Image (cartoon, coloured by chain):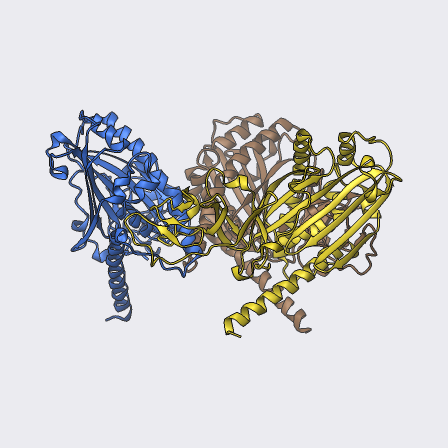
Chain colours: A blue, B brown, C yellow
Amino acid sequence: MFPKNAWYVACTPDEFVEKPLGRQICGEKMVFYRGPEGQVAAVEDFCPHRGAPLSLGYVEDGLLVCGYHGLKMGSDGRTAEMPGQRVQGFPCIRNYPIEERFGFVWVWPGDPEQANRDEIPVLEWADNPEWAYGGGLYHINCDYRLMIDNLMDLTHETYVHSTSIGQREIDEAPVSTKVDGETVITSRYMDNIMAPPFWRAALKANHLADDVAVDRWQICRFTPPSHVMIDVGVAHAGHGGYAAPDAHKAASIVVDFITPETETSIWYFWGMARHFKPGDTHLTAQIRDGQGKIFAEDLEMLERQQQNLLDYPQRKLLKLNIDAGGVQARRLLDRLIKAEQQQNESAATGR
Amino acid sequence: MFPKNAWYVACTPDEFVEKPLGRQICGEKMVFYRGPEGQVAAVEDFCPHRGAPLSLGYVEDGLLVCGYHGLKMGSDGRTAEMPGQRVQGFPCIRNYPIEERFGFVWVWPGDPEQANRDEIPVLEWADNPEWAYGGGLYHINCDYRLMIDNLMDLTHETYVHSTSIGQREIDEAPVSTKVDGETVITSRYMDNIMAPPFWRAALKANHLADDVAVDRWQICRFTPPSHVMIDVGVAHAGHGGYAAPDAHKAASIVVDFITPETETSIWYFWGMARHFKPGDTHLTAQIRDGQGKIFAEDLEMLERQQQNLLDYPQRKLLKLNIDAGGVQARRLLDRLIKAEQQQNESAATGR
Amino acid sequence: MFPKNAWYVACTPDEFVEKPLGRQICGEKMVFYRGPEGQVAAVEDFCPHRGAPLSLGYVEDGLLVCGYHGLKMGSDGRTAEMPGQRVQGFPCIRNYPIEERFGFVWVWPGDPEQANRDEIPVLEWADNPEWAYGGGLYHINCDYRLMIDNLMDLTHETYVHSTSIGQREIDEAPVSTKVDGETVITSRYMDNIMAPPFWRAALKANHLADDVAVDRWQICRFTPPSHVMIDVGVAHAGHGGYAAPDAHKAASIVVDFITPETETSIWYFWGMARHFKPGDTHLTAQIRDGQGKIFAEDLEMLERQQQNLLDYPQRKLLKLNIDAGGVQARRLLDRLIKAEQQQNESAATGR
């Protein structure tokens, strides 16, 4: 259960440099490539000739050539040409609204009529010289909402990531959740504590003392369909915490785009946008590697949790205060999914 | 959906030299071995004692000994003996009409009453000193008819096998399909072209110039249930092409026995019968290796095509002129399958 | 189909020294660990907070800490505490009657009210200085009853274990089966034969001549739900066989605890309790390795037999005299399973 009328991150441009990329997004098998003027394109990964996956083919003059018998597909889902054939009557395949922006490829798997490129979220840190970004991609066999829950309740850091970003104080600090329009915000402030290893390294990298008390913050922002941006950082204690001047803190945004592949699997685009030492590419690589290792610690937990939920479908889970972020996010999603279903039903009955 | 009252290639004799061979053919689990006088035998791979697979056992004095508790099975499907047991009342298992001929083992998975060994196709190139044969076996997860389509429409060579036997002229040359009784024939003649790499090597091996224009031919012959023999070759241009004297050409038959394992998997016996330099065993090995690599290029395409068709069961595929060979072959098969079903129903109702 | 109101061997204590052990027993996902005073504990492997498997967590002060968000589970299935939460209202999970005894951990997957620790079978050879024990664990994809059949009909040794414990005389010697209350006993005595390799080595290890005739015995004892203890051994011929004085024989008990994981998979605890040279730990290791290799020979046979039975569900298997042990064991099991079902139905209707 996921909204289909929404912009999802489908891939990054480096994934289809050599050849087209086949990937399933929200249950739709798509192929990603560059069309006539180099712009990104996505059509169904299904050749109308004999059903071969177009992603096994290649791009020629902006047309996607089927690698089986040479049908040339246009980015509009219409066959452009085929050796020795008249192609006007060939059935179309779906093409998908698509946009390359902020270093990601965004796709709209639902009704193309409703796709509005202005609704692609603005990533203020992207293409911004004051920020540096590094990230990666994991495939995980779980419902996308389990990952939203995971990111909206960071008390798991104490247990899953105990050697890097976890610390007892996360469990102990009060957490507050509020809904602001279509954004769910869960915040936690931990003042006057010692930084855990990951943040001690970040302070050091930013030429700040790492052996003094800090104020730490975590502000998780969920927006539909499944983006979670988390303001994280530490400032030397007493300088204003989250609001401290740059000279006293190390601040970043944890970036999470969670794209459903199927009902029980996701493409998880994770990364960190850093607001200090943006020109230090070595540091960017170092942080990406570290984050990659930390985030990999969640994989087994999420996949085994998913398996447990499939095995015990009747069980009700608890909704504690720490779960409020996930609960509110699901409430928003349920509303969107229901609206989409009603819309589809109205369209089907012609009303 | 495949005819069961038909002769299929099940295996080659080298596959059960050391021990019995268990293999599923047309949904029937069979075990192949040599019986009392060394003749090939096939029975169900199911011991009537406790259901163990007989293929885990061994052969002793022409009897198939179950490797679990020593029941000795005869090639007629009747238990011959078992230590300490009277076996007269033991239930029979199926045995299958079987024949070793032309270097292959042929099996009839359907009604044994209807099996006529005279209907095993005659392979004029087998056991013939004017010809040399080399081949191999692939297991592929696809409906056997997808492989028939593949072989009856060689335009795919241009795309799937572009570095060996493919060339643009295949797409450009007209193709003709005709049905002659129970044979479907699709022919293509390409005159006055340059040979692609595979055929240049063949010309060279036959001590013919490989840098001159040639006439190339491809004549695909489908016969039920799933055999495709393809006359292929090149002759120096202007000498009559397919009909040119041996001194001016390199000619072969591509041999394809496509045996269904299940509805969506096959045992694919491929090979090449060569009508030049038959005594050159090194050349035979070289061609087999080359053909093996070329035919392996089809595997991913066929398996992913099959997956796409399973994912989109409602989609209708196109039937273009290039697809006529496959379309006619399927028409023949549909007729045979329907006749077999009616026969089975009549038998069931006693009419 | 297995009784759930029964004591099964779930694991051995060494399996959860480092961290909790997650294991499915009779369809129940359990986690095994040591509770407050070091006693063994088993609860459902499902955290009541968000469904994470508790087996991914750790033990602290005898409480099982969920590795996701730190919920602390008691061995009674009640949440003991959780950071920042009141836990009184949390739903309970199942806990299972459990007992560490004779070197094994015994669990009762059924109705806890009916669990009686006195019914755990007495293993006279365990914790007994006159005996030595070595064993191992295999996971096998088969119905637990196929393994019972296997062990109650040792004629398979002649075929499956032909190079170690098998010999023609097993097939030839008469076998007798009797039911004594809830025990099924199948016996075979082979007098005045040459010992097979495994037993020649055992004689040698016991400083007895291995090149003289022996009397060999196999007495298989099945008790529900799925324990098979087999008295095995050889004595120099003419000294009384099974009843011969210790000085003339090498005698052991083959130990088999067959614990269903699902309907078609098992945890198979195998071992050998030896009644000679009990202090020779090197010999214990040597015998365990040998037995491990021999028993591994059954795995493929059992898994392929299971697959055959799933593929041919309508086939009736033979019940020969050699199968009497398995047949009687299944009869006992059927009765227990039926009684359990009736009891459950009565409970459900309140009668």
Describe residue B72's horizontal placement relative to residue C117 as left or right: right
Tell me where residue C238 appears, x and y as whole percent. 89, 40
Quarter the C terminus of chain A occupies: bottom left
Please indicate whether residue A337 sits to the left or right of residue C227 in the image: left
Front position in the image: A148 or A59 = A148
Residue B67 percent location from the top left of the image = 73, 45
Q: Is B196 located above or below residue B312 in the figure?
A: above
With C19 as the anchor, is B291 left or right in this view?
A: right
* Front-most of residues B267 and B343: B267
Observer able to see residue B61: no
Single out the residue that lies furthest toward the front: C37
Res A207 → quadrant: top left
Q: State which quadrant residue A243 falls in.
A: top left
Q: Position of residue B257 (x, y in %)?
A: 60, 46
Say above or below: B167 vs C332.
Answer: above
- Identify the residue at image location x=71%, y=40%: B19
Q: Residue at x 26, y 42 (%)?
A: A170
